[in-house]
Amino acid sequence: MTGNLGVHRFRAVSDCTALIAAFFGDKKEDKVRLRLKYRKPTTFPCNAGSRFSFTALVWTLVGLLLVFHLVSICHKDNIHHGEIQSRTSGFLRRPIYHELEVIEEVKNINIPPPRGKRSSRAPKRKHHKRFSPIIEEFLDEDSQLRHVFFPNRKNSIDPIGMTGNDSSYYFPGRVWLDTDGNPIQAHGGGILHDEGSETYYWYGEYKEGPTYRAHKKGAARVDIIGVGCYSSKDLWTWKNEGIVLAAEELNATHDLHKSNVLERPKVVHNEKTGKYVMWMHIDDANYTKASAGVAVSDRPTGPFQYLGSKRPHGCDSRDMTVFKDDDGSAYIVYSSENNSVLHMGPLTENYLDVEDVMKRVLIGQHREAPALFKYRGTYYMITSGCTGWAPNEALAHAAESVMGPWETLGNPCVGANKVFRQTTFFAQSTFVFPIPGHPGLFIFMADRWNPSNLRDSRYVWLPLIVAGPPDQPLEFGFGFPLWSRVSIYWHRKWRLPSGWSTLR
Ligand code: DGJ
C-alpha cells in the first residue's frame, strides 16, 4: 500500500477540480455570474470607460494560473513517465524491475482454534492478550504456525551448499548461513559499502546464549556478546569476519558488560580521517541508560576501540541509526523522549561526537527502528511503531532535508496479505541501502525477532523501489507536495538483477 502518495495526488487533483468547478461554473458560481450580469460594471480607474469587469479579470487570472498549473503537472508527469520508461526499458532493466515489482500474494493465515477448544495437551499461551490473535500466534513459541514465521533449519539459505534453482535467492525468514555453515549473527544491523576494497560489510548484534528476562517484567534479552561483522562481494554469500567489538566479561561498570544492552550498531567510513566509526544503542538491562555509544577502527574488520557513550544533546536515546550523506556529512537519528519523538542531528566532522544541533521530528508519533536513505536529492526513512519485540506496521517518510520537516507517506509494504503488510512482514526495519547501477532499487533490511529465542531471530531482506514523480513540491503546491512512491515488495523468494555488481 503506497497509498499516501495517491492520497496527496488525489487531494491536489480534487482541490484543482473544486477550483475548476468553481471557476467554470457550479450552481453557486452560476448565481455569482447572474449577479455579475445585472451588476453595474466595475471599471479600472486607470482605464476609465472600459466595460471590462474587475471581478471577471481576477477570475480570468485565477483560471489562467490554474490551467498553467495543471499543464505543468501533466508535463511533469509526462517527463516522469518518459524517464521511468527509458530507465526501465534500458539494457536489462525492464524485466528486472517487473520481476521485483510483481505483487505476490500470500493466502490468509488460518488461526488455530482458541485455547479452550484446543487439545488439552496443547501448551498454554504465555503472552498476555495485548496483541491481535495472529501476533499472539507469532509470539507463541509453541504455536502450530511456528514454521510459517520461523522455517525449520533444514530450509536454510546456504550459499555454499546451494546450487541450481535457488542459488542467489533471498528467502525472507529462513535461517541464513555464512560461508562456514553457521547462522549469520548480525541483528539490528546495517551495511557498509567499502569503496576501496569494493566489499560490503554487514555489522549487527551477535546474539548467542540463552534468552532470559533480567526481571519478571523486563524485556526478553540475551547477554551482550558483541558486534558481528560479515563481508561479501555479492550481498548473498557472507564470510564471518568475527566479533569486531566484543563484550566486557569482568568489569560490571563497563557499558559493554555482558549484562547490559548493545543494539543496532551502524558503521560509517570517514574519508577525512580514514577511520571506520561505529555508533550503537547502549543501555542497561532495564533500558534506563538510554545512550548512544561510539567506537572506532582503522579497518572495516576491526577491532573497534570503544570510546564511550553519552546521551546525545542531553536526551534519552534508544533505537538509533547513522546516515552518511553524499557530501560526507553524517547524522545520528534516535528515538527519544521515551520513544515518542525522533531526534536528528549532525555528527562532528570526525563522526566521533554529535554537534550541538538537533531537530525533533515525527513528534508524538512513537516511531523507532529508523532506516534512512536518499534518492535523487530526497531523503526517505522507514520506521516502525514501538511494541517491543513484537512486529507492527512500518511507515515511510520523506523530507527535502535530513533535518526535516519530515512528511509521512504511509505504509510502504506491498503484496502478501493484510496481516503481513500490517506487521512489516512480521519484521522490523533496520537499514536500507542502494543497489548500484539500478536507480531507485534498494534492499530493505529488517529483523524478524524471535523473543523466545533471540539468537534465532531471522532476516527479512526485500526489494524496496522508489518510483514516481520528481521529489519536488508543486510550484504552486496548494500545500500538497508530491513525493515519490516508496514500495517494499513481498517475495517468498527473490534475487537481485543478474550482473548488478558489474554495473557499479
Ligand atoms: C524494539 C527495538 O527496536 C529493538 O531494537 C529492541 O530494543 C526491542 N525493542 C527491545 O524490546
Image: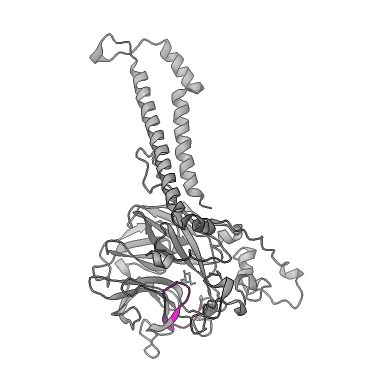
Horizontal and vertical percent position of residue 451? 55, 75
Residue 128 seen from this side: no
Quarter of the rendering containing residue 262? bottom left
Q: Residue at x 46, y 83 (%)?
A: 223
Q: Residue at x 30, y 75 (%)?
A: 276
**Observer-nearest of 177 and 132:** 177
Give the residue drawn at x 60%, y 64%. Answer: 131
Task: Please give the name of the residue rendered at 44% of the width and 54% of the height, measured from the top-left corner.
Answer: 90
Is 307 placed above or below 19 here?
Answer: below
**Residue 259 versus residue 94 in the image, above or below:** below
**Picture coordinates of residue 29, whole percent (x, y):** 46, 21
State left or right for residue 358 relative to residue 111. Answer: left
Report which quarter residue 155 is drawn in: bottom right
Rendering colour mode: one colour
* Placement of the C terminus among the 4 image quadrants: bottom left
Is 153 positioned to the left or the right of 112 in the image? left
Q: Is residue 380 magenta?
A: no
The reply, left or right, for residue 129 in relation to residue 283 is right
Region of the chain picked out in magenta, as a range: 220-239
**How far across and down, in percent of the image, does residue 234 sit?**
44, 72
